[in-house]
Each structure stands twice: as C-alpha cells, then as structure tokens.
Amino acid sequence: MADPITPVLTKRWLSPNSWQIGTYEALEGYTAVRKALAGTPEQLVQLVKDSGLRGRGGAGFPAGIKWSFMPQNFDKPHYLVINADEGEPGTCKDIPLMMADPHSLIEGCIIASYAMRSNHCFIYVRGEALHCIRRLNAAVREAEAAGYLGENILGSGFDLKITVHAGAGAYICGEETALLDSLEGRRGQPRLKPPFPAAAGLYAAPTTVNNVETIASVPFIVNGGSSWFREMGREKSPGPKIYSISGHVEQPGQYECPLGTTLRELLDLAGGMKDGVPLKFWTPGGSSTPMFTAEHLDVPLDFEGAAEAGSMLGTTAVMVFNETVSVPWAVMKWTEFYEHESCGKCTPCREGTYWLAQILERMVEGKGTEEDIDTLLDVCDNILGRSFCALGDGAVSPIQSGIKYFREEFLALCESNKRELVGAQA
Amino acid sequence: MTSTTAVPEPGPHAAEQTHAAAGRDVDVVAIAAERDIAEGILAEHALEEIFDDSIVAKAQDLIARYPQSRSALLPMLHLVQSVQGYVSQEGIAFCAKQLDLSDAEVSAVATFYTMYKRKPCGEHLVSVCTNTLCAAMGGDAIYKKLQTHLGSEEKPLGHEETAGMPGEPGSLTLEHAECLAACDLAPVIQVNYEFYDNQTPEKAVALVDALQAGKKPAPTRGAPLTNFKDVELQLAGFFPADNDRYRTDVDGPSQADETLRGAKIAQDRGWVAPVAKDVPLPEVEKK
C-alpha cells in the first residue's frame, strides 16, 4: 500500500530554484533521457503501454496506445504537441508544474519525441500563463546549452527542436484538434475526426497531442519501470496524480496522491472544510465533470471509480463548495463560461449554451418557472452527444447533475412565479 | 421505385422584378464631396510609420521558427499589441502583409481570441477571475468593487474599459476573466498576466491605487511588474536581451504555500513514493 501522498512529479518542488537545470540535474534530472536514447522507440512505446499511464488531460486515454498509432515511416515529419492550454474551470495542476519543474516536461518531450520519431515538438501554453512561458523558454535554452536539445543529442544521432508557443485566450484550444488549428495560425475550432491527429494532425502530418502531466510522468517511468509505476494507484488507473483542491477547505493546494484516493482522504489532508461549514457539492475533475455531493465522499477518484458513480475523473480539479453556495447560481456561472467559450462552429453548442445561460440567468433573478427546468433538460439533451466536440458535452454536465441532486433548489427559485390557478370558470 | 420531384414552375414575377439588378461600378472618388479625403480613404496606410524595421525583423524571426509561416500569426498578433497596445486595423494589415494573407483572414483570427484587444489598452491590464470558484470565494465582489472604484457608483467601469487615457502612465484597463488556473489561490487577479493571489476587495483596491500612482507592486507569482506592451512582447516570444533582467524575470517567485502544500505534508510526515529501482527497458521483438 502506497503512502497517502506519493511525491513523484512534485518531489522537486520544495527544492530551491527547482526550475533551474542545476537543481534538476542534481536530483536525477536528465538520467532517464540517457537510458531512453540507448533503447529503441519500440521499447519506449512498450514501456509506456505496460505502465498503464493514462492521459492526464481529462479523457484518460492510454498514452502508450496513443503513441503506437503514430506511423513508423518517415513519409512526412512527425510532431509531438504538448497541450499546456490549461483552462478547465477548477484545473490548476499543469501551471504549477511548469513553473516549479519545467525540465521534467522538457525531458519527457525528448523521450516521447524519440519514441514517436518526431524531430520537432511544440509546447502550446495558454497565453495567460506568462510565467510558465518564461520558465519553459529558459528551460529550453538551458537544455540546448547542455546538449539535451538540438542536433545529435548526447551522441545518439537523434535531433530535436522544441518551440514554446503562446496561445491567446480561448478555452476551446484545449481540445486537441482545435489546438492544432490554433497552432497553424487559425481560429481555434475543432476538426472532424477521423482522420485522427496520428494520421493527419499538425500540417496534416502524423501528430500526437499529450497533456503536460502525462509527458512529465514519462521520465520517472523510464527510470523506475512499469511495475514501480503500478505500485501506486489502481489496476486500471495506475500511478500518482496531482489532485488540485480548491474552494471551501482549510488548506487548498496541490496534493499528489495515488489514483483512487477519495474526497474524504483528500479533505483530511487539506485540513477539512473551511471553518467547519458542511460540504454541499463538489466536482471530481473540473466543471465539465458532473458534480458530486456529500454522498460521494468515499468514491475512489480514478477513471473507473468516478465513472461508476456517474461522473468523470477529468483533470482531478477538486472544487469544493460549502452550504453557503447556491447550486443554481454556480450552474449559471459555469454556463456563462461555456457560452463565452463556445467556438461557434456547431449549432447545438453555439445556440444551446446561449439559451441555457439566458434561462439560468432568468431563474437566478427569480423570474423562472417550473417549466424552465424541463426546458433546460430538453436543451441539454439536444447538446449532449450532438455537438462537434466535448465542449458541448461538458456544458451540460453542471446543469444535468445540478438538477439531479438539487432540483428543489431550482424549484424554490420559481416559487413566486407559480401560475395562479384560476378557479373553475362558469 | 422512387418518383422524381417535379421541376418547379416559374413564379408569378420575372427575375428582374425579384432581384435587384446589378448596377455598374461606382467611382467613389469621382462622386465624393471632398476629393482629398476620399483619396485618403483608398490610399494604403503607411504601415512603415507604425511598424519600423525592427518590428519587421521580429516578424520575420517568428516566421522562421515554424515549418509553415501561418503558424507565426498568433505570436505576431502579440507582437502587434506590444507596439500599439491593441490590435488595430493597421496591425491586421501588417500581419497580413508579412504572412501573405488577406486582411479578412487575419481579422477572423484576431477577433476569435480574448487576449487580442480591439481597443487601446491602458498601461496595465487588470483581469479579475469571475469564474464560479473564484466568484464564490469573493471574485465577483472584487470585480464589482473595482468597477465602482475605477469608475463611479453611477457609472461603473465596464468590461474592457479603461480608467485614464490609454498610453498614459497609470491608465488601467479592467476586464473580468475566465478561469485563470489558480483555483487553489482563489480569488485571483492578474495584472499584465502576472498573478496576484488570494485577493480581497480591500487588497484589490490598494493594488489598483498603487498602479494608478505609478507604483509597481510585486506579484505573488511572476516577474517584476512592467506594463501591458512589455509582456505582449514576451508573449510574442521575445525576452529581455539583458541577461540580468532575463534571469530576474525567470526567477520571479512561484512557490506559493498552496502549490507546495502536498509536498510539504509528505516531507513532514515522511511519506514517499515507492522506491524506484533501475530496471532495464522492456524487451520487444524486432520487426
């Protein structure tokens, strides 16, 4: 049984100047890349498959399988693109990681690029994360100067260039195909799949898009092996995971625990509810994951556990709200977010989020009626599974789950607007 | 067997009556009341006056960083903002010219992204997170307070409006932002994309007062505060050439208590990840 907190990705964060190459190298940094470059790409893909590492960006797709989709020929250049466009409400793990330990991401990029036969890697960072962009840029410069990037890395014959690219403020660019369009200098709108990026991604060339935390995990797996990685977490969701606890808790922050840790355990680490005010609702992994309540304190927070309980693990952005927060208000705020961030490409999402926000705003103002609840659910049904990308699906999560667990609160808002029943007319 | 659809019958009106007949081209200069001004409208703007050779060189540098030139458009729009404090029509024309795109193609991109401003920004851009979690922790109250503090009770400052004259010292553009990915430090404000964490309405008022007075309070996470145009140059991918300044920026604080909390508890309690033994990479069959 692993310890309650298992610092792997976060193990260097307490060291002074943890973002500098000197600190990184003194703490086993750039040892995995030597080992990886001495092996073959096939061995690395197999290793990541064996480790069971699943994508940390929300969807949880097995990283090794994703890598294996990349063609083994060189008909076109291959690209690795890092999704560092962290923007899902509640999610705040990649930004501290890139600030505290950017070299772990750079080392992961080198290993992953070698495994996928890519000689150019892009790190797409959301523009608002300026300090991360500085740190990454400095890390790339340091790695180039030390011979970890550039031509013939460590005498292996492998070349790699890393370009740090700043976004410009659009949540949708966290969707991998929208990110690729944005990186090509276009409006960030999702593409139809197939073709998947491994067949036709950036510049229509074979591309893999991976999350920051996923790739930063790779050097540790190379050094420790797949069995070591599987000593943490659960069978189908192995490894450690950075849980970001925010909201009404005494000690919000980043806690790297084995996958499968419950909210009860996390609350214990985070000092319990703030001022002892009881828990009302929470999200396991951002606003796009259906909310949970105090009934779900013991749900194991891994990909299977969260799904079995009717939600999703998402990005393990655990937002905790106490009894003082109105659910319809919170749902309205989230819906306004999705309305603002809908890219406009597909009708269900563009129009749906627009009307959902207006209905919720009306209800929160106290001008709603009971029928509005049915209208909300009806509109949700017309978005879920019918929109172009997952943004639309995410947009309905707070509404559907909010009404499922807190219908009375929505009804209470309509209390004053009940249609007066006029007595039977003669 | 499927039956074919009948060919539509002509309507009651002839085509000339239902569609406006296309007119001939009009010479707008010839019919203009003031000929000089009309000619000015059609003349090419003097881009060189706004974007000098050093900016052109930077734009070309950006293009060289990517396998295909158009990828340089997002950084180039940041570059344009570093010159003018917003993306002007001239800025759009400049990018279009550098990348051999049409103005419309560049406009389509510039208008899609929140960080490209369509009106001149103040010396500083103040972004208050009002997404659900920050809002519940006090972000909405902070934003409202700043609106009336920078505007007035009767006329609060609106989203993306500026207190003071853009371009003048101490001018501030206020905006409400979506989730800034610092939820454990809620509620948060960014000034020129540097983080000011764990805010309250009182702290936020003190912050904007200091900015208006020409001071540059240090962010809780980020580099020493400069101004909006300066950080836009960094977002475009150009960092200070002076090495000391560069190091000071990069080494600006980031280790918030919240960020380190889990690692600190583990250290205090002696909790560690399982010990990793150096194991060889798995064997795979050669294909």
Image (cartoon, coloured by chain):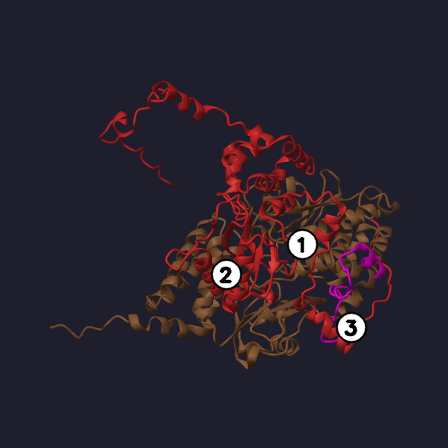
Chain colours: A brown, B red
**Residue type at tag 3:** Val
Q: Give the residue at mark 3.
A: B272
Give coordinates of residue B101: x percent, y percent: 56, 32
Tell me the mark number nearer the camera, choosing from 3 and 2: 2
Q: Residue at x 80, y 67 (%)?
A: A228
Corner quadrant of residue A79:
top right
Asked if labels 3 and 1 share a chain, the reply is yes
Give coordinates of residue A96: x percent, y percent: 67, 61
Q: Give the residue at mark 1.
A: B223
Chain assignment, label 2: B
Closer to the chain start, of discs 3 and 2, is 2
Dot 2 lies on which element?
A: loop
**For residue A200, above or below residue A48:** above
Q: Give the residue at mark 2.
A: B130
Between A74 and B145, the residue placed more toward the observer is B145
Q: Was residue A10 drawn as part of the magenta stretch in this picture? A: yes
